[in-house]
Amino acid sequence: MTIQVFIGFDSKEVVAYHTLCQSILEKASEPVSFTPIVLSQLNGVFTRDRNALQSTEFSFSRFLAPYLSNYEGWSIFMDCDMLMRADIAELWALRDDKYSVMVCKHDYQPKEDVKFLGQVQTKYEKKNWSSLMMFNNAKCHALTPDYVNTRTGLELHQFKWLDSDDQIGSIPILWNYLVGVYDKDPNAKMVHYTEGGPYFTDYRNADYSDEWFAARDRVEWVAQKS
């Protein structure tokens, strides 16, 4: 079975998208398909205006992953500002059909009011839960384009589209390890540069940045060689 991965794509973080894909492919033991969620490719599907508080272009369009999967099977959504350090097949194996969606349940309240590129650091319950989601797509029919286009950010990111929080399964935190929030851990399976990635000058020395630059360099080397 192919592992279906949706990744948020932001025009300000193009290098992040490709580096994440590279880090996944290098370690994957099973076939993986990538679908970047690009707003220009969602004409007529995603129609909501950009909110002044959203820090990325895919803040809300991420919730279209079940629709884009025809509400079939399972799919993974992840932010682009991540780096895979383990085999994604291990994450895929955690799927549990009793849940509608599975996430890393962070207890995270940002201390700062501003993050990368001067973006407002919004604070709300279930912060960062939606940055990595494994969707049991058949149980996510509530996430229609109309719902995603019209509901508030909090309704989407706090999973109000579910009947109960009991429908949210738990993924170990090591799969969405928040850089700069948690102490550096060599066992982290996927790290998340939620406050700013190494591709921004102010965060060049963030934890795991050497690994990120190494993966980026391998993308560039392949491109130059070809």
Image (tube, rainbow, N blue to C red):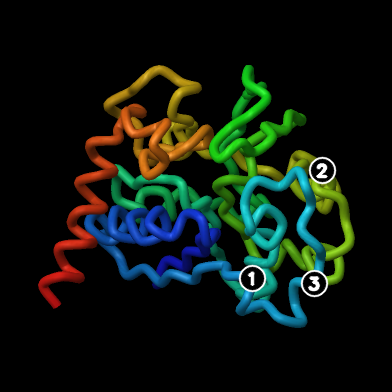
Q: Is residue 111 visible?
A: yes
Quarter occupied by residue 150: bottom right
Does residue 65 appear left or right of residue 2 in this picture? right
* Residue at position x 47%, y 53% in the image: 80
Q: Is residue 132 shown above or below 21? A: above
Quarter occupied by residue 83: top left
* Residue at position x 61%, y 74% in the image: 69
Dot 2 alpha-carbon crowd within 10 angstroms: few under 14, some 14 to 19, many 20 or more: few
- Give the amino acid type for the residue marked by disc 2 in the picture: Leu
Dot 1 alpha-carbon crowd within 10 angstroms: few under 14, some 14 to 19, many 20 or more: some
| Quadrant, the C terminus | bottom left
- Give the amino acid type for the residue marked by disc 3 in the picture: Thr
Q: Secondary structure at mark 2?
A: helix
- Which residue is tagged 2? 154
- Lower sequence index among marks 3 and 1: 1
* Residue at position x 64%, y 70% in the image: 39
- Which residue is tagged 3? 47
- The numbered mark at residue 39 is 1
Residue 182 appears at what percent x and percent y? Answer: 46, 21
- Lower sequence index among marks 3 and 2: 3
Q: Is residue 1 visible?
A: no
Dot 3 alpha-carbon crowd within 10 angstroms: few under 14, some 14 to 19, many 20 or more: some
Q: Secondary structure at mark 3?
A: loop
Depth-wise, is mark 3 or mark 2 nearer the camera? Answer: 3
